Amino acid sequence: MASTRISTIADHIQHPTDISQANMVQKVFQLIPGVQSYDWGIVGASSSRVAQFAAATTQLDFHPQADKPYAELWMGTHASLPSRAILSSGTQDLSSYLAAHPQLIGERVIAKFADEQPGCLPFLFKVLSVGKALSIQAHPDKALGKRLHAARPDVYRDPNHKPEMAVALTAFRGFCGFRPLEEIARFVEGVLEFAQLVKVSRAEVESAAAAAEAQKKAVLKTIFANLMNSPQSAYAPLAAQLAQRFSQGPVEGVPEQERKLVLKLAAEFPEDVGIFCTFLLNISTLQPGQALFLQANEPHAYLEGEILECMASSDNVVRAGLTPKLRDTDTLVEMCTYQSGSDRGRLAGERWAKSSPAQVEALLYDPPIEEFSVVTTRLGEGGVVRNKEVGGPSIVIVLDGSVLLKEDGVAGGGLRLERGQLAFVGAGVGVVFSNVGAGEVGLARAFVEA
């Protein structure tokens, strides 16, 4: 042991530059994102923010095709599509750089999320361009995530949970959680095709609506299980019949929003059982700046629009409708919490105290989980905004305009970022954003603290 320590000391004496190199750790640097093309994405660079933002980082060498859908821009360290750091010494995986310099994540964050691999962030930040509906799905909690990964690692590739939050960049629609039973009862009465599949009467549903919470959840589970476990021979002809009937014009007892959504889903996924979730799940409509928090075990589906999305660093999805991918209906039915109510998941942004001056709009979206928060900032032409140090790592993306990002209190330099480009900010680093272009700057920053 003594000889080892002597050897180590001698090595430090012979290589005095090691200490200076350690002091030259880059705390703020540009990132190279990843891009995913899925069938549900928005086609072409002229319409898809994902394609536009991906093309903004020349080091990605991304060249969008006019006829290809672009769905997700990934920003983080998830092994499926990790970001790369652009450093003065070249590029390397963000996770490897953070593993070598853990102070950029912060001791408290590392200790809090000890299950993460060295250099990995506990959150994954994304931009989504949704052209057509995603699957009817839910994400597991931590306990279920571990069980699913152990049992089927080829399908559920990590053991983590995946609560997630969506902040609208454009007008956006999605399914989020179960409707109140009173609304479901009216659709059981008014949509015969739906009633044939769920196999309950309006009276039964209305009775449950007035009962104790446990009875409400039991009836909801029966309805959902009966619907999603229906054989294709039952639901396919009824879905075709429903689409044909709704295409004829307004339907008594069915709002126009639901009628038109049925036709949209029928065009995208003909004769799919997920079409009937229109009558079972809340339809949430967001305007830019509005947000939804999707907790674990909550059924949902994105339908159309563009969003920021932040989540625990996982890719676990349990699907059962509106998808050509693997359906795990039994798991989905068993995992849901069966809570119900209108406007489930709505999350308001609040003024972020670490941003100054107060006149600059900086809205904090802080869901009731530990892995992430998101701040959006709007900065007028010529404006400057300061963000105090955050006790953990951050990823920033420029949504609009051109910005100069500098470490607060450090003279000179800075990192110029254009629309769609992104940067990493290390733990404990205060930063200054200056609008250096024409027009307003829009920023989004995902971070974690402990």
Image: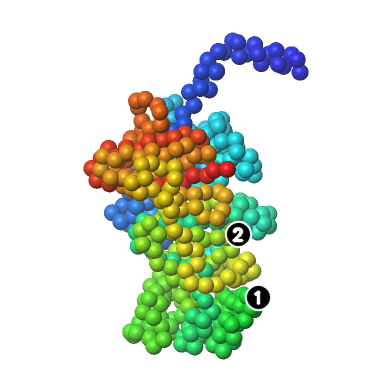
Residue 21 seen by the camera: yes
Q: Amino acid at mark 1?
A: Ala
Residue shown at 56% from the left, 45% from the top? 122
Residue 245 against residue 143 in the figure, above or below: below
Q: Position of residue 363 (x, y in %)?
A: 41, 51
Residue 227 against residue 334 in the figure, above or below: below
Image mark for residue 450: none
Residues marked 1 and 2 touching at CB (< 8 Å): no
Q: Find residue 449 and report its image quarter.
A: top right
Q: Position of residue 359 (x, y in %)?
A: 33, 46
SS at badge 2 = loop
Quadrant into which the N terminus falls: top right
Residue shown at 64% from the left, 55% from the top? 142
Residue shown at 39% from the left, 44% from the top? 397
Q: Please name whichever residue, 143 or 231, is drawn nearer the observer in this view of the structure.
A: 143
354 relative to 109 in the view: left or right: left
Q: Please name whichever residue, 140 or 321, is drawn nearer the observer in this view of the structure.
A: 140
At label 2, counting other C-alpha atoms closer than 10 Å, the crowd grade (few under 14, some 14-19, many 20 or more) is many
Residue shown at 47% from the left, 34% from the top? 429
SS at badge 1 = helix
Q: Position of residue 204 (x, y in %)?
A: 59, 87
Q: Which residue is mark 1?
A: 214
Q: Amino acid at mark 2?
A: Pro
Residue 15 against residue 300 in the figure, above or below: above
Q: Which residue is mark 2?
A: 140
300 relative to 140 in the view: left or right: left
Q: CA distance from mark 1 to mark 2?
A: 21 Å
Q: Nearer the viewer, mark 1 or mark 2?
A: 1
Residue 420 seen by the camera: no
